[in-house]
Image (spheres, rainbow, N blue to C red):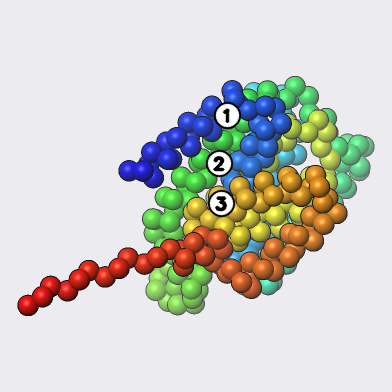
Amino acid sequence: MAGKLALVLLLMALIAAPEILSPYHRSLALAILADVALAVSWAFFSGPSRYLSLATGAFFGAGAYLTAIVGARVPWPLPVLGGALMGCAMALVVGALALRLRGPYFAVFTFGLAELAKHTLIWYETGVTGTVGRLLLAPPGPWTLYYTVLCLAGLAVVTALLLRRSRWGYALVGIGADEERAETLGIDTTRVKVGTFALSAAFMGAVGAAMAPRWTYLDPQVFNPFVSFQTVIMALLGGATTVAGPIVGAVFLGLASEILLLKFRYFYMLGLGLTLIVVVLALPSGLAGLASRLRPSPSPLPRPQP
Protein backbone atom coordinates (compact mmCIF):
# COMPACT_ATOMS: atom_id res chain seq x y z
CA MET A 1 0.00 0.00 0.00
CA ALA A 2 2.80 2.40 0.89
CA GLY A 3 4.56 1.64 -2.40
CA LYS A 4 1.43 2.40 -4.44
CA LEU A 5 0.92 5.66 -2.54
CA ALA A 6 4.54 6.68 -3.19
CA LEU A 7 4.10 5.88 -6.88
CA VAL A 8 0.95 8.02 -7.09
CA LEU A 9 2.67 10.92 -5.32
CA LEU A 10 5.66 10.64 -7.65
CA LEU A 11 3.42 10.69 -10.70
CA MET A 12 1.55 13.74 -9.40
CA ALA A 13 4.87 15.49 -8.75
CA LEU A 14 6.09 14.74 -12.28
CA ILE A 15 2.86 16.05 -13.79
CA ALA A 16 2.98 19.23 -11.71
CA ALA A 17 6.73 19.77 -12.20
CA PRO A 18 6.46 22.37 -15.01
CA GLU A 19 4.29 24.53 -12.77
CA ILE A 20 6.60 24.52 -9.78
CA LEU A 21 10.09 24.20 -11.26
CA SER A 22 12.26 26.96 -12.64
CA PRO A 23 13.17 26.81 -16.35
CA TYR A 24 16.60 25.39 -15.48
CA HIS A 25 15.25 22.63 -13.26
CA ARG A 26 12.48 21.88 -15.77
CA SER A 27 15.14 21.43 -18.44
CA LEU A 28 17.10 19.14 -16.11
CA ALA A 29 13.97 17.08 -15.40
CA LEU A 30 13.33 16.80 -19.14
CA ALA A 31 16.85 15.49 -19.76
CA ILE A 32 16.57 12.94 -16.94
CA LEU A 33 13.19 11.70 -18.21
CA ALA A 34 14.73 11.23 -21.66
CA ASP A 35 17.60 9.27 -20.07
CA VAL A 36 15.07 7.11 -18.20
CA ALA A 37 13.23 6.30 -21.43
CA LEU A 38 16.49 5.43 -23.23
CA ALA A 39 17.90 3.32 -20.39
CA VAL A 40 14.66 1.39 -19.78
CA SER A 41 14.10 0.72 -23.49
CA TRP A 42 17.72 -0.44 -23.87
CA ALA A 43 17.41 -2.73 -20.86
CA PHE A 44 14.27 -4.55 -21.88
CA PHE A 45 16.16 -6.00 -24.84
CA SER A 46 19.83 -6.11 -23.84
CA GLY A 47 19.21 -6.87 -20.15
CA PRO A 48 17.62 -10.34 -20.39
CA SER A 49 19.09 -11.32 -23.80
CA ARG A 50 22.69 -10.30 -22.86
CA TYR A 51 23.20 -8.81 -26.34
CA LEU A 52 25.20 -5.61 -25.77
CA SER A 53 23.69 -3.08 -28.16
CA LEU A 54 25.62 0.13 -28.89
CA ALA A 55 23.14 1.38 -31.49
CA THR A 56 21.24 3.80 -29.25
CA GLY A 57 23.03 6.81 -30.74
CA ALA A 58 21.99 5.76 -34.25
CA PHE A 59 18.30 5.37 -33.41
CA PHE A 60 18.25 8.54 -31.30
CA GLY A 61 19.97 10.51 -34.06
CA ALA A 62 17.60 9.19 -36.74
CA GLY A 63 14.57 10.35 -34.76
CA ALA A 64 16.13 13.73 -34.02
CA TYR A 65 17.07 14.38 -37.65
CA LEU A 66 13.61 13.36 -38.81
CA THR A 67 12.13 16.07 -36.58
CA ALA A 68 14.58 18.58 -38.05
CA ILE A 69 13.40 17.68 -41.56
CA VAL A 70 9.62 17.43 -41.15
CA GLY A 71 8.95 19.09 -37.79
CA ALA A 72 7.89 22.44 -39.26
CA ARG A 73 5.53 20.85 -41.80
CA VAL A 74 3.50 18.40 -39.70
CA PRO A 75 1.67 18.88 -36.40
CA TRP A 76 3.08 17.62 -33.14
CA PRO A 77 3.39 14.75 -32.13
CA LEU A 78 3.59 13.27 -35.65
CA PRO A 79 7.38 13.76 -35.73
CA VAL A 80 7.62 11.65 -32.56
CA LEU A 81 5.59 8.88 -34.16
CA GLY A 82 7.74 9.18 -37.27
CA GLY A 83 10.89 8.90 -35.15
CA ALA A 84 9.53 5.71 -33.57
CA LEU A 85 8.81 4.23 -37.01
CA MET A 86 12.24 5.29 -38.26
CA GLY A 87 14.01 3.64 -35.33
CA CYS A 88 11.88 0.51 -35.68
CA ALA A 89 12.59 0.23 -39.42
CA MET A 90 16.33 0.66 -38.91
CA ALA A 91 16.33 -1.98 -36.15
CA LEU A 92 14.44 -4.49 -38.30
CA VAL A 93 17.05 -4.18 -41.05
CA VAL A 94 20.03 -4.14 -38.69
CA GLY A 95 18.61 -6.85 -36.46
CA ALA A 96 18.03 -9.22 -39.36
CA LEU A 97 21.76 -8.97 -40.11
CA ALA A 98 23.47 -8.27 -36.79
CA LEU A 99 21.47 -10.49 -34.44
CA ARG A 100 22.96 -13.51 -36.14
CA LEU A 101 26.22 -12.42 -34.51
CA ARG A 102 26.96 -13.03 -30.84
CA GLY A 103 29.22 -11.66 -28.15
CA PRO A 104 31.57 -8.79 -29.05
CA TYR A 105 30.77 -9.05 -32.77
CA PHE A 106 27.24 -7.77 -32.22
CA ALA A 107 28.51 -4.92 -30.03
CA VAL A 108 31.09 -3.87 -32.63
CA PHE A 109 28.53 -4.02 -35.44
CA THR A 110 26.02 -1.86 -33.60
CA PHE A 111 28.72 0.57 -32.48
CA GLY A 112 29.57 1.27 -36.11
CA LEU A 113 25.92 1.91 -36.99
CA ALA A 114 25.93 5.50 -35.67
CA GLU A 115 29.10 6.33 -37.59
CA LEU A 116 27.71 4.72 -40.75
CA ALA A 117 24.48 6.72 -40.45
CA LYS A 118 26.35 9.95 -39.76
CA HIS A 119 28.71 9.69 -42.74
CA THR A 120 25.93 8.49 -45.06
CA LEU A 121 23.91 11.55 -44.10
CA ILE A 122 26.91 13.85 -44.61
CA TRP A 123 27.44 12.38 -48.09
CA TYR A 124 23.76 12.83 -48.95
CA GLU A 125 23.51 16.38 -47.61
CA THR A 126 26.68 17.63 -49.31
CA GLY A 127 26.11 15.76 -52.58
CA VAL A 128 22.35 16.12 -53.01
CA THR A 129 21.02 19.03 -50.96
CA GLY A 130 24.23 21.06 -51.06
CA THR A 131 24.17 21.85 -47.35
CA VAL A 132 24.86 20.17 -44.03
CA GLY A 133 22.56 20.64 -41.06
CA ARG A 134 19.00 21.79 -40.49
CA LEU A 135 17.36 24.66 -38.65
CA LEU A 136 14.46 23.71 -36.41
CA LEU A 137 11.70 26.17 -37.19
CA ALA A 138 8.59 26.68 -35.05
CA PRO A 139 9.40 24.12 -32.33
CA PRO A 140 6.70 23.20 -29.80
CA GLY A 141 6.72 24.89 -26.41
CA PRO A 142 8.78 23.59 -23.47
CA TRP A 143 5.69 22.29 -21.65
CA THR A 144 4.71 20.25 -24.72
CA LEU A 145 8.19 18.76 -24.91
CA TYR A 146 8.18 17.93 -21.21
CA TYR A 147 4.86 16.10 -21.25
CA THR A 148 5.78 14.29 -24.48
CA VAL A 149 8.99 12.92 -22.97
CA LEU A 150 7.19 12.14 -19.69
CA CYS A 151 4.67 10.05 -21.64
CA LEU A 152 7.47 8.25 -23.48
CA ALA A 153 9.29 7.47 -20.22
CA GLY A 154 6.09 6.20 -18.61
CA LEU A 155 5.20 4.13 -21.66
CA ALA A 156 8.70 2.61 -21.70
CA VAL A 157 8.37 1.57 -18.05
CA VAL A 158 4.91 0.06 -18.63
CA THR A 159 6.19 -1.79 -21.71
CA ALA A 160 9.13 -3.17 -19.72
CA LEU A 161 6.79 -4.41 -16.98
CA LEU A 162 4.43 -6.06 -19.46
CA LEU A 163 7.29 -7.59 -21.43
CA ARG A 164 8.81 -9.17 -18.31
CA ARG A 165 5.53 -11.01 -17.67
CA SER A 166 4.99 -12.07 -21.28
CA ARG A 167 6.08 -15.16 -23.23
CA TRP A 168 8.58 -13.02 -25.12
CA GLY A 169 10.05 -11.82 -21.83
CA TYR A 170 10.60 -15.41 -20.67
CA ALA A 171 11.98 -16.26 -24.10
CA LEU A 172 14.52 -13.42 -23.85
CA VAL A 173 15.66 -14.70 -20.46
CA GLY A 174 16.07 -18.15 -21.98
CA ILE A 175 18.06 -16.69 -24.88
CA GLY A 176 20.34 -14.88 -22.46
CA ALA A 177 20.88 -18.03 -20.38
CA ASP A 178 21.50 -20.47 -23.25
CA GLU A 179 20.38 -19.55 -26.76
CA GLU A 180 21.04 -22.95 -28.30
CA ARG A 181 18.97 -24.68 -25.65
CA ALA A 182 16.19 -22.12 -26.15
CA GLU A 183 16.14 -23.01 -29.86
CA THR A 184 15.90 -26.72 -29.08
CA LEU A 185 12.90 -25.96 -26.85
CA GLY A 186 11.06 -24.53 -29.85
CA ILE A 187 11.62 -20.80 -29.28
CA ASP A 188 11.93 -18.80 -32.50
CA THR A 189 14.95 -16.91 -31.20
CA THR A 190 15.46 -14.80 -34.32
CA ARG A 191 11.88 -13.50 -34.30
CA VAL A 192 11.98 -12.75 -30.56
CA LYS A 193 15.34 -10.96 -30.77
CA VAL A 194 14.53 -8.89 -33.86
CA GLY A 195 11.04 -7.99 -32.62
CA THR A 196 12.20 -6.85 -29.18
CA PHE A 197 15.20 -5.04 -30.67
CA ALA A 198 12.84 -3.15 -33.00
CA LEU A 199 10.52 -2.29 -30.10
CA SER A 200 13.46 -0.95 -28.12
CA ALA A 201 14.67 1.09 -31.10
CA ALA A 202 11.20 2.58 -31.60
CA PHE A 203 11.38 4.18 -28.16
CA MET A 204 14.89 5.46 -28.83
CA GLY A 205 13.85 7.02 -32.11
CA ALA A 206 10.80 8.59 -30.48
CA VAL A 207 12.93 10.08 -27.69
CA GLY A 208 15.36 11.52 -30.24
CA ALA A 209 12.47 13.07 -32.17
CA ALA A 210 10.98 14.54 -28.98
CA MET A 211 14.29 15.98 -27.76
CA ALA A 212 15.35 17.51 -31.08
CA PRO A 213 13.41 20.80 -30.63
CA ARG A 214 15.65 21.63 -27.65
CA TRP A 215 18.28 22.60 -30.22
CA THR A 216 17.77 25.29 -32.84
CA TYR A 217 20.19 23.64 -35.26
CA LEU A 218 20.99 20.00 -35.97
CA ASP A 219 23.69 18.45 -38.11
CA PRO A 220 24.84 14.84 -38.62
CA GLN A 221 26.91 15.05 -35.44
CA VAL A 222 23.66 14.23 -33.61
CA PHE A 223 24.53 10.60 -34.40
CA ASN A 224 26.76 10.60 -31.36
CA PRO A 225 28.20 7.31 -30.02
CA PHE A 226 28.43 8.99 -26.60
CA VAL A 227 24.64 8.57 -26.32
CA SER A 228 25.09 4.82 -26.77
CA PHE A 229 27.77 4.49 -24.09
CA GLN A 230 25.95 6.73 -21.63
CA THR A 231 22.75 4.70 -22.00
CA VAL A 232 24.63 1.45 -21.40
CA ILE A 233 26.32 2.85 -18.28
CA MET A 234 23.00 4.09 -16.88
CA ALA A 235 21.31 0.72 -17.34
CA LEU A 236 24.24 -1.31 -16.01
CA LEU A 237 24.77 1.03 -13.07
CA GLY A 238 21.20 0.59 -11.89
CA GLY A 239 20.85 -3.05 -12.90
CA ALA A 240 19.87 -3.97 -16.44
CA THR A 241 17.92 -7.10 -15.51
CA THR A 242 15.32 -5.17 -13.49
CA VAL A 243 12.82 -2.46 -14.39
CA ALA A 244 13.71 -0.15 -11.52
CA GLY A 245 17.46 -0.46 -12.08
CA PRO A 246 17.72 1.60 -15.30
CA ILE A 247 15.47 4.25 -13.75
CA VAL A 248 17.75 4.54 -10.71
CA GLY A 249 20.85 4.57 -12.92
CA ALA A 250 19.43 7.25 -15.23
CA VAL A 251 18.40 9.54 -12.37
CA PHE A 252 21.68 9.07 -10.51
CA LEU A 253 23.93 9.55 -13.53
CA GLY A 254 21.78 12.38 -14.88
CA LEU A 255 22.18 14.37 -11.67
CA ALA A 256 25.85 13.43 -11.30
CA SER A 257 26.67 14.43 -14.87
CA GLU A 258 25.03 17.81 -14.38
CA ILE A 259 27.34 18.48 -11.43
CA LEU A 260 30.46 17.00 -13.00
CA LEU A 261 30.04 18.80 -16.32
CA LEU A 262 29.85 22.13 -14.50
CA LYS A 263 32.77 21.62 -12.11
CA PHE A 264 34.98 18.91 -13.63
CA ARG A 265 34.24 19.06 -17.33
CA TYR A 266 37.49 17.48 -18.53
CA PHE A 267 37.27 14.58 -16.09
CA TYR A 268 33.68 13.67 -16.92
CA MET A 269 34.48 11.16 -19.67
CA LEU A 270 37.21 9.62 -17.51
CA GLY A 271 34.69 9.27 -14.70
CA LEU A 272 32.20 7.53 -17.01
CA GLY A 273 34.84 5.05 -18.13
CA LEU A 274 35.86 4.29 -14.56
CA THR A 275 32.19 3.90 -13.59
CA LEU A 276 31.69 1.33 -16.35
CA ILE A 277 34.76 -0.63 -15.23
CA VAL A 278 33.69 -0.62 -11.58
CA VAL A 279 30.14 -1.69 -12.43
CA VAL A 280 31.26 -4.55 -14.66
CA LEU A 281 33.86 -5.85 -12.18
CA ALA A 282 32.31 -5.12 -8.78
CA LEU A 283 28.58 -4.61 -9.39
CA PRO A 284 27.52 -6.93 -12.21
CA SER A 285 23.91 -6.72 -10.99
CA GLY A 286 24.04 -2.93 -10.53
CA LEU A 287 22.72 -0.92 -7.64
CA ALA A 288 19.47 -2.89 -7.66
CA GLY A 289 21.36 -6.14 -7.15
CA LEU A 290 23.46 -4.58 -4.39
CA ALA A 291 20.32 -3.37 -2.62
CA SER A 292 18.76 -6.83 -2.78
CA ARG A 293 21.90 -8.40 -1.30
CA LEU A 294 22.06 -5.86 1.52
CA ARG A 295 18.36 -6.23 2.33
CA PRO A 296 18.02 -8.41 5.44
CA SER A 297 16.40 -11.74 4.74
CA PRO A 298 13.21 -12.53 6.68
CA SER A 299 13.84 -14.52 9.80
CA PRO A 300 12.48 -18.09 9.71
CA LEU A 301 9.25 -18.82 11.52
CA PRO A 302 9.70 -20.57 14.87
CA ARG A 303 9.02 -24.28 14.78
CA PRO A 304 6.00 -25.36 16.83
CA GLN A 305 6.81 -27.20 19.99
CA PRO A 306 5.46 -30.75 20.26
Q: Locate residue 119, reporting x and y percent.
A: 85, 52
Which amino acid, mark 2?
Ala
Q: Is residue 91 above or below residue 71?
A: below
Say which mark, if any, is on residue 248. 3
Camera-side residue of 30 and 80: 30
Q: Indicate the quadrant where residue 134 lies.
A: top right
Say which mark, if any, is on residue 153. 2
Q: Secondary structure at mark 1?
A: helix
Q: Locate residue 225, reporting x and y percent.
A: 76, 55
Q: Is residue 256 above or below residue 179?
A: above
Is there a contact, CB below 8 Å, between mark 3 and mark 1?
A: no
Say which mark, if any, is on residue 17. 1
Q: Residue at x 47, y 65 (%)?
A: 294
Residue that protrudes farthest toward the left in the picture: 306
Pick whichever of labels 3 and 1 is earlier in the sequence: 1
Which amino acid, mark 1?
Ala
Q: Residue at x 66, y 51 (%)?
A: 253
Which amino acid, mark 3?
Val
